[in-house]
Each structure stands twice: as C-alpha cells, then as structure tokens.
Image (cartoon, coloured by chain):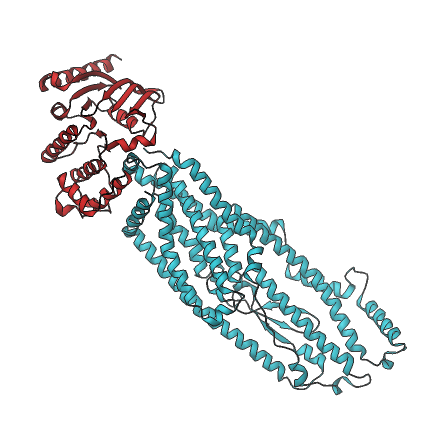
Chain colours: A red, B cyan
Amino acid sequence: MLQATNLTKNYSGHPALTDLNLSVAPGEVYCLLGANGAGKTTTINLFMNFIQPTSGEVMVNGLNAQALETKKYLAYIPENLNLYGNLTGSENLQFFAGLGGAKPDKPASEKLLESVGLQPEAIHKRVAQYSKGMRQKVGIAIAKAKQADNLLLDEPTSGLDPQASNDFARLLRDMKENRVAILMATHDLFRAKESGTHIGIMKAGILVHSLKSDEITLTELENLYLETMKAESHAKTNY
Amino acid sequence: MLKLIIKKEILTALRDIRLQISGGILIVLMLTAVLVGRQGQRKIGVERTKAQSAMYDKWLNQGNKHPHSAAHYGQFAFKPKPVLSFLDVGLDNYTGISVFLEAHKQNEILFSAAQDSNGMTRFGEMTAALILQVLLPLLIIFLTFNIFSKEREEGTLKLIHAQGLSLRQLFLGKVWGTYLMVLLIFLPIIVLAYLLLDDQSVNLDGGVTMKFLSLTSGYAIYFLVFVLLCVLISAFAKSSGFSLLLLLGLWIVSCIILPKATTNLADKVYPSPSQFEFRKTIKDKVKKGIDGHNPSDVRLASLKQQVLDQYGVSTIEELPVNWSGIAMQAGEEYTDQVYDSEFSKIEEIFKRQNRLSEWAGFVNPYLAVRNLSMALAGTDFEHHIAFARAAENYRRAFVKKMNKDMEVNHKPGVGYGDYNVGMEMWASIEPFSYQLPSTGTILSNQWRSITALVFWLVILFFLANIYAPKISKL
C-alpha cells in the first residue's frame, strides 16, 4: 500500500510537487503521466526516501517512508538502470537481490533472468556489454527477486524495444495479480491505459487529474492529456 | 549484507584493468624491494661482522707496545645492520656505520651511505617502507576516489539504497572491501619477507618476530586509517574528479610537504648547533674547565698534589705508582664529563625534534607510521644513539684498562719505550658487541606514534558513524 498525503517538495523555494494526495492499494497499478518536470520522478524519489518532503507524509504499508524498514516492502526500477559494468548480469542480480534480503543462488538467478526475457547466453556476460533494454531486464529481475509488496517504476519502458516492452507489460500483469501495489511514472499513454488501473496526469508539480483507467478510452485519455499540457503551456505563456 | 558488499568491492576492483596494472606494478616493486633489500641487508650484515672481527684480530695482533700506545692504536666499533632494516632503512644511510675508538676523544660515527653516494640518495631508496608508506596509499586513492561518487554518478547508489541497505552499512562494506584488497597485496609480501629471515636472524635483535608483528600491525592500522579517510572523502565529494583532486592533494601534503615542513619546524623550534660549534665547545671546556674557571693545568696541579698527599711523598718520582697513568685516566674522566654534558644537550635537542615529529603524527598519520616503522626496523635515531652509547662505554672501559695497567705496572723511572704489554693484555679486552633495544623498549619509546595511529582510527570511525548516514543518495 502506497500513500501520499498533502505531499509537497520545494527546491530552494521553487515547488517541484504541491499538495499531492494519492494512494495505491495492493493489486492496483497507478500510472503517473506528465511532461518532463511535472513532478513524477520527484514523487517516486519521495516514496523511495531519496529526498525528504518539504511537508506532508509518504507512507509505505502504513510506515513513514523515511524509515529504512520500508525498503523491504519496496522494489524500484529507475529510468536508466545502471548496474556494475564489470559484473555479469547474474552477479549483479545476486548482489542487489542479496541486499534486498533474497538470496538467489546461481541457478535461481539464471532462471529469474530468463523469466524476464534475458537471452541465456547474455546471463554470464559482463553488463558493460549489455544494451539498455538488457540492463532494464536485469532491473526487473532484481525487483521480482525481492517479492516486495510495492513496486515503484520510473519510466521503466523508456528505451525498451516493442518485444521487451510487451514482456514488461506481462510482468506488470503478473505482479498486479499477485496483489503488488504499483506506482509507475511514464510518458507512454498506451502502456498506462493498458496496464494501469488508475491514471494520474500531473503538471508543474500538481496532480491535475486522477481517474480510473476503465472510465476512459485511450483516445479520451490522449485528448485529456494534450489539453492539460496545452493549459500548462498557456499558463506558462500567460505567466 | 556486509559480506555481499565486500565481495562485490573486491570483485569489481579485481576486474578493473587500471587497478590490475597499478596493483601489479606495486606488487612487483614490493617484491623487488623486499628481495633486494634482504639480500643487501644480509651482505652488509656479513661485511660488518667480518670487519668487526678483522679489526679485533688486528687489535690482538698489534704486537707488544705500551698500553697508552695501544689506547691510541684504538679499535673500531661497527654498527650491526638490524635484521629488519631491509624493510625500512630509516636514518641508516645518514648516521654512519662505524666509529674509531681511541684514548682522549669520542669520535664521530662515520662512513654513512649518503657520504659515498650521489645526490640521488636524498630522494630515498626504493624500500618496502617507502612503498608501504607512500605508494600503497596512492593505490588506495585509486581504489577509493570514486567508490561513492561513481555509484552516485551512475545511479547504482539509488539502487543499493532501494534494497534497504543503510548508508552506514554501505560505508563500512566499502571500507572493509577496500581494506581487504589492500591486505591481499600487503600480507603475502610481508609473510614472504618474514620467511626470508633465517633462524640466526630471528634469534638476533632481541625478538625479531615480535618486532615484525608490531611492524605489520602498525602498517595494518595505517592502511585502515588511509582507507577510512579516502572513503569518507569520496562519500562527500561532489564528483569523482573533485574527489581524486582532493585525495591527491591530501597525499602530496601528508607524504611530501608535511614531513619536510615538520623537520624544518623541529629545527626552527629546537635549533641544533653546527658540527664546528659543537666540537669547539667541547675543546674549550676540556681546556678551560666545564665552568670555564678550571683550566687543565690547574686541574692537573691539584690532582698531583692530591696523589702526592695520598702516598705521603713530595715528588712524583717517589710515587709507588705511575703518575702518567693516573693523570691520563683523570684526564679521560674529565673529558668524558665534558662529552657527556655536551652530548646529552645535543641528544636532548635531537630527541625534542623527534618528539615533535612524533606528536605531528596526530596531524599526519604518515609521520606516525614512519616513526614507528623506523623504530621497529632498528634504523631510527634512538637506535643510533643506543649504538653510540654502547661504543662509547666500550671505549671508556678499554681505555681505562690501559690506563690502569700503566698506573699499576709501569714503574716510575722506567722509560716509556721500556714498558710494553702484549697479546695477553689485548685479549683481556672482549670484542665489541652490541644488543639492539628490545621490542618493549621500542614500543614504549614510540607511544606517541602508536597513540596517534589509534587516535586517527578512532576519530575516523567516529566521523564515519556520524556522517555516513548523511551521504547524499542522488
């Protein structure tokens, strides 16, 4: 369960996020849409406690996100997943999953990596030779290995090929079925509509719209998004 | 978790080609320094033992002569080469190796390696100590300068933190991981160095094994201090480049600038007289008396009167003993007093200078380990002084014996050339031998350096404990 209450983050007096209220229950996928700088990554960073809120509260499974303990309930995949280049995919998985409390041995890590679509011949190659999509798959395997209650995704499909992106959507479905609460920041309207149970549209640090995904068609979502963005640019011009 | 981080740190470092090359070069240098150093130390040790023995043979076979002539014929004392000096030559190249022992004066210890070398000696020999104290910290810098900043720059720090690892655990993992890497280089070579010692060497020098263990522990603490310092700086540096710049600056200051500055400061605070001034003071005091109002002729006249009164005679010709023997021994003893007084003053100046350098270990851990290493290797100033004292005691004893023989056996009226002694007399003087200070003595002398190293360790762990949780994750 992920919950933000009146969450605000300012950087040197400039608002990056203003009064955000949202909650993601187990089995829900909440997709945050918005232009760059809308506050999506700031929201994820606050849930991960990479930064501290200016005001408001961030809760993970009922615990304040600033408590280190919450990390065992959280899995995280950033937009650009950088791993250790001179370790293999399998070694990276064993290291990060090990830190998260899971202890996959070599065969288990191979199986996990294969399950997220990494080619078997790549598993024992050093990550320095991986493409972005391959690294992203290792990140997904790390998140899977952790078997956390909540998953935070920051533009996870950016740079993935269509096949990998599709595999990723399947993975999200599996996790949703396993009652994982998922909060995903994305630019991909199609993926948000397809995978999300809830969709939020953000602009200038404010959650402007929050709706259930089955209440809206993809076209309506697209129009709503564009109108919101236009309003933003008008607002900026007027400002 | 700690184990995982340590394993990862070692694995990534071992696979880093830059570290493979720099670590490899360091290992080769260390091996060369240890092997060549040990061979050289053994050769010099044998040479000095042979020279000492040859000089004693020469003493024994000097033929029949007057004991005072024998006191001037003199002997040589050779400074034994301490077994562990192959690891740290310390001041050995500058302090001289042998001293000529003769009647009436304390000679300087001469024939230092620096006297026989070109100016390059001033830049130091490539010894194990130089590598351990100066170059290995450089490797630590290359291992650690981006240990945090790279993770931050590449985003892996966020991913690590996301797994629930506290920054304190991460910090410690990185410290221990790097430290183990350093020990992987250091320990095998130091063990090899110990194995190079033969049984005879181990039994010499008042407990070489203990000295070796203390030396190893001193370096082990020093490396941990350096690793902690570097990881701490890397953790708070804004970028890898800035971290490298900062650490290299710190290395230059602590290993090059501060040691020189400390020496200069010690010389300014506790100035030592020049060799010329020192010798002139001694000469003047012997001539004019310690207080300047007791010239040698007055002293001699007073002694003469005292001896005549003691034997109840009015001329030295009537004495049952040899007046010259008594006068010479009295002269010796007076000169000894002057030397003792002046040497103790200059020794105190040097000791104060060294103490300042030892206190400076609280500012610069390099100085602490350098002083401790020299002391345990037997190449510091204290060892030099201990040898000088042993040689001087030996000189006084043998000169006294010559004077005593002259006083008792050279009957009045017998001409100087008519009284001679021979081999039996010479053999009654034992050959010079010198026992190096024990490990306990060295460690108690070096308490400031040891405390400084421990102080650094405690302070850095304390700072790490406070500041590690404040490391930026982004």
Q: Does B339 sit above or below residue B138?
A: below
Nearer to us in this view, A63 or A48: A63
Q: Name the quadrant containing residue A56.
A: top left
Q: Name the quadrant containing residue A110.
A: top left
* Residue B240: % across, % down: 34, 41
Q: Residue at x 43, y 51 (%)?
A: B223
* Residue B146: % across, % down: 34, 43
Q: Does A221 sit above or below residue B160?
A: above
Q: Residue at x 27, y 18 (%)?
A: A20
* Residue B386: % across, % down: 60, 64
Q: Residue at x 62, y 49 (%)?
A: B269
Residue B447 visible here: yes
Q: Residue at x 39, y 57 (%)?
A: B186
Q: Quadrant of the C terminus of chain B?
A: top left
Nearer to us in this view, B457 or B379: B457
Left or right of B271? Residue B187 is left
Left or right of B472? Residue B272 is right
Q: Does A73 sit above or below residue A91?
A: above
Q: Quadrant of the N terminus of chain B?
A: top left
Residue B89 visible here: no
* Residue B72: % across, % down: 68, 77
